[in-house]
Every structure is written in structure tokens, then in C-alpha cells.
Image (cartoon, grey):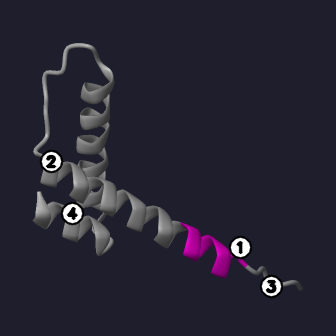
Amino acid sequence: MMQLANKAAQGDIRSQREFISLARTSEEAANSEVSTFIPHEMDQKVMEDILRRMKSISADTTSTNPEPKTEES
């Protein structure tokens, strides 16, 4: 889980997709009355931290480059 989280934080697209899928599965299980998947407490903390960092990076990228500049003829 830690390797996946680290790769996702470094920008690896495949790892980000897998991590997000695991996070969704974890959230769905937590929201259901009968939980079939209970992540280890440390895994849950790692997933929350990675999601926070990914959102932060996304927000930083958007604020530094709000719209791509186009060249006018």
C-alpha cells in the first residue's frame, strides 16, 4: 500500500487510478451497514494523506496555470 501511495503521489497515472479505486472501495465499505472490507488503520491514513496531497497538487497547478495562453494571429 505504501509503494502504491508513493507512486501515486509522484504522478504515476496507473498508481493514481488504482489508489483512487481502493479509496472508493474503502469509502463504500465504510458507508455500508455491512462492511466487507476493513482497511488497516495505517492504510486508511495513508490513503487520506495521498488524496489530500493529490488535491493540493491539483489546486496548485490550477492556480498557477488557470488557462492555457493561446497565440493570436
Mark closer to the chain start, 1 or 4: 4
Q: Position of residue 32 (x, y in %)?
A: 29, 18
Mark closer to the chain start, 4 or 2: 4
Q: Position of residue 58 (x, y in %)?
A: 52, 67
Alpha carbon distance from label 4 to label 2: 15 Å
Q: Residues within 10 Å of mark 2 (few under 14, many from 20)?
A: few
Residue assigned mark 3? 71
Residue assigned mark 2? 41
Q: Nearer the viewer, mark 2 or mark 1?
A: 2
Mark closer to the chain start, 2 or 1: 2
Is there a contact, CB below 8 Å, between mark 4 and mark 3?
no
Residue 5, which numbered label?
A: 4
- Mark 2 lies on a secondary structure that is helix
Q: Residues within 10 Å of mark 4 (few under 14, many from 20)?
A: many
Left or right: residue 41 compared with residue 15: left
Mark closer to the chain start, 3 or 1: 1
Alpha carbon distance from label 2 to label 1: 37 Å
Alpha carbon distance from label 3 to label 1: 16 Å
- Mark 3 lies on a secondary structure that is loop
Extent of the magenta region:
59-68
Alpha carbon distance from label 4 to label 3: 38 Å
Residue type indicated by callout 1:
Pro
Does 54 sit above or below residue 63? above
| Residue occupying image coordinates x 33% and y 71% | 11
Residue type indicated by callout 2:
Glu
| Residue occupying image coordinates x 80% and y 85% | 71
